[in-house]
Amino acid sequence: MTKIGIAGVLAVFAAGLWLVAAPFAVGYQHPGAGWTGATRTDVIAGGLLAVAGFAGVLGVIVGRVGELYADARSAASLAAPDSREADRRNTGS
Amino acid sequence: MTRYLSGLCVAGLGLCGGGWLIVAAAAFGGEGGSAGRVNLATGAGLVLASCAAAVAWAVAWRRRLRTDGVLADRFLLVSRREARRNRRELARDVRRTARRSRRDWDAGERGSGMNGHALNGAEVGGTGLNPYVHGSFPGVGYHGAGHDGASAAEVLGELRTLRGLLGPLLATAGSSLAASAPPAASAAPAARARGPEPLAGDDEVRRLADGEDAWW
């Protein structure tokens, strides 16, 4: 499920990029001419979507890395008493 | 939690953006054919992708919460249909029982149980036996089998048995209390130490029966 969610976020980002490039790629905005209303709409909406998608991807990565850090911390805190106990057994103290 | 929230936020923004693109395609449709088509196709795809992403993030978050123990699993011991059927049967049983008890009550009021021979005995009211009388009358003789003389006689027999059993115990407890209590406060234990009081007979039973009537 998380993969589908990440794919959706990436799709939003890709759609934003596509919308920014679409007027020039498809050709309904002639180079050198003033921007039409459709071009302006596409570029603004595409830019917002691209920024949102990029922020979403960053948020997903940050959240995942934060969870990994938290898991590592909890695993270390669980393992610490065991290692101390093992050391005590080995040293006989 | 951060990734679920950000994924849901981006999915919501994608939904808004896709909707806006569809609206824009309709608004600027007459301006250029290719621009309208691009906006419409991109908006529709964006809406679909955002919907899928939102559902996926929501399901993933719920699964995570359930794994962490924040959300409790629903254990349905019986199906909803079975629960409905059980509820109907229970309501029917309650109605039937209420109807039957009302019928027994009417029949008992017409009968002569409370004025029958069994309750005219002289050994019903002991002070220590009142709790038993209150507890047993609704279940056994009074509401269960009506007011007939036989059940009242059974109750009286049980009362006498209990009185015979509890009388010495009460007398012992009363004497020990009387021995340990100060003289000013020893009137009641001393009275209890004298043994069971003389029985009140019909008056006591009628008083109890009135109490039961009021209770019912």
Image (spheres, rainbow, N blue to C red):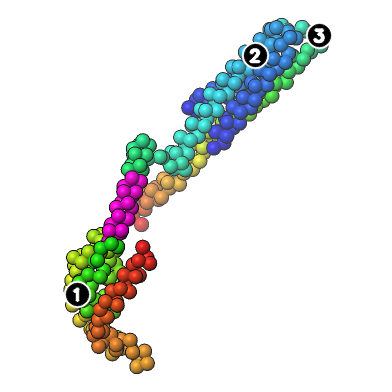
User: Total marks drawn?
Assistant: 3
Residue lying at 47% horizontally and 43% vertically, measured from the top left? B70
Residue lying at 65% horizontally and 25% vertically, measured from the top left? B16
- Disc 2 crowd rating (10 Å Cα; few below 14, some 14-19, many 20+) is many
- Residue type marked 3: Ala
Above or below, B116 against A71 in this view is below
Residue lying at 60% horizontally and 19% vertically, measured from the top left? B46
Residue lying at 59% horizontally and 27% vertically, measured from the top left? B11
Q: Which residue is mark 2?
A: B40
Q: CA distance from mark 2 to mark 3?
A: 24 Å
- Residue type marked 1: Arg
Q: Is residue A64 left or right of residue A34?
A: left
User: Residue B5 colored magenta?
Assistant: no
Q: Considering the image in quadrants, where does the C terminus of chain B appear?
A: bottom left
Magenta segment: B91-108
Above or below, A90 against B213 in this view is above
Question: In front here: B172 or B180?
Answer: B172
- Residue type marked 2: Leu
Question: In front here: B109 or B136?
Answer: B109
